[in-house]
Amino acid sequence: MRMSRRAYARLAVVASGIALAAAAWAQNSTIDEIAKYRAALQGGNPAELWEARGEGLWNEPRGPNKVSLQKCDLGLGPGVVKGAYTQLPRYFADADRVMDLETRIVWCMVKLQGFTEADAKKNPFGAGNDRKADMEALVAYVTSESRGVKMNVAQSHPKEQEAYRLGEKMFYFRGGSHDFACATCHGEDSKRIRLQDLPNLTKKEGAQKGYTTWPAYRVSQGELRSFEWRLYDCFRQQRFPELEFTSEAAIALTMFLAVNANGAAFDAPAIKR
Amino acid sequence: MNKTFLAWIVVGGAAAALVGCATKPTEAETQAKAAQVLKASFKARGQAGMDRLDQDDTQKLCTEYATAAPPKDVAEKIEKINIATIAWPADGKYVGDWRNGERIAQEGRGKQWSDDPAGPVGGNCYACHQLAPQEVSYGTIGPPLYQFGKVRGYNDEIRKYAYGKIYNAEAYNACSNMPRFGHSKILTEAQIKDLVALLMDPDSPVNK
């Protein structure tokens, strides 16, 4: 998909805004200034570029079968994208397992488009213009179609209940060289790492705030980041080995956090520092 | 235990086995399954091998009692096994150079799969603690340590405590969030002494 001239102009405006905001930030590294900086960025979110590219990829005939993803069933029926993300992860009878969004996109790329599973999973997280990730663009598009919709993740199928229970245990699992668990940083109210506020993901309010604002465009990385990336990079900092993309642990933890966020309006792709 | 009670346990166990998957798994079963699923969901990368997911007794107990403080006997057990691991400095000196300590406290790298195994490795103390007042970018997961030595007194008892606490925090406060920097071979003895200096040297900015 080619970017329109208008999109380029928009990107230039956003980029200069970021440069100005960054300069202001360097002079006053206080929490108030960071809050102002974040507010200033809300006006133009480069995540829109990923959303537009993802929409193009969704509708484009691709893969060995040269078909689009328009018949992909994200849980609400073939082709229904609107609101689908707010009901994921969920149990899919055709796969007889619980899937998060990324896992389901891989499933559709394999079943509909004829990609091998390895090809569908090979570049989950992008690195600037040199290595754009189609997966992050697709995630940006699908999630953007849930903006404003209330989180409503089901716990009706036994496998959905099991995923939640396992995700909860993993959240409290202490390991690695530093004895860290997810809960080490995300288990209490009003804590920070350096100046970064940490949501308490064990409480409804914190889980809602944290979960509904991913995916996000990360200003510091110039990249749109999916929720699977968020988990992947938390585990890196936790000093664990590398979390595998679309692994059962990634899905279970997502289930735990998504269910805890139920009831809140989904508000992403967002923009973060 | 009398025979009737024992018989009831046998009957109960058989009933649970019959119902099978219809019964909710126990906490311990879920815990074991979660550990197993975690192992199947990660791969070794760089210096972060799969052994990072093998929990020692302290990690196991602190996972089991993660949502509420461990009971007194468990806490005592954890502290006992951890105090035994502390290698005290052979020269009996606890205090190094606070200037190095400040650098170690600022350094966030070390032990991540993305880090160079050849270093540098830091304690990343500012991620969680307030220390020198000049550094305004500090976290709040741990207590503020500004004026640590000034408030507690510049004596060997406190120096030794600071050394031991950095070496193995679980020896003093079971299931503390703080890494066991010496025990887990994150920092060297010399680095821990430098951090003790940052906390305990009267000339350190922490005590100004």
Image (cartoon, coloured by chain):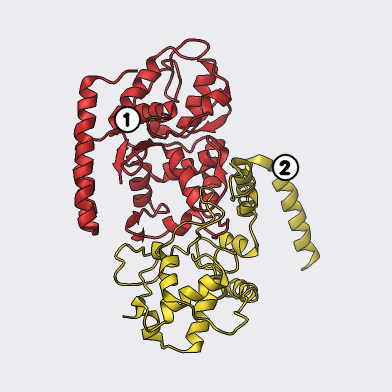
Chain colours: A red, B yellow
Q: Residues within 10 Å of mark 1 (few under 14, many from 20)?
A: many
| Chain assignment, label 1 | A
- Residue B199 x/y as whole percent: 42, 77
Percent x, y of residue A44 = 21, 35
Amino acid type, residue under disc 2 in the picture: Leu
Residue situated in front as seen by the camera: B123 or A54: B123
> Observer-nearest residue: A8 or B167?
A8
Q: Is residue A269 left or right of residue B8?
A: left
Say which residue appears at 49% left-offset and 80% top-offset. B95
* Same chain assignment for discs 2 and 1: no
Which labelled disc corresponds to residue A144?
1
Measured in 3D between alpha carbons, the distance from the residue under mark 2 to the one under mark 1, in whole angstroms, is 47 Å
Q: Secondary structure at mark 2?
A: helix
Residue furthest toward the top? A66
Percent across and percent down for residue A154 are: 45, 36
Label 1 element class: helix
Task: State whether residue A152 is above or below residue A110.
Answer: below
The residue that label 2 is drawn on is B18
Q: Does residue B173 lie above or below B65 as drawn? A: below
Tell which of A48 and B176 is nearer to you. A48
> Mark 2 belongs to which subunit?
B
Q: Locate the N terminus of chain B by quadrant.
A: bottom right
Task: Identify the amino acid type marked 1.
Answer: Ser
Q: Is residue B29 left or right of residue A251?
A: right
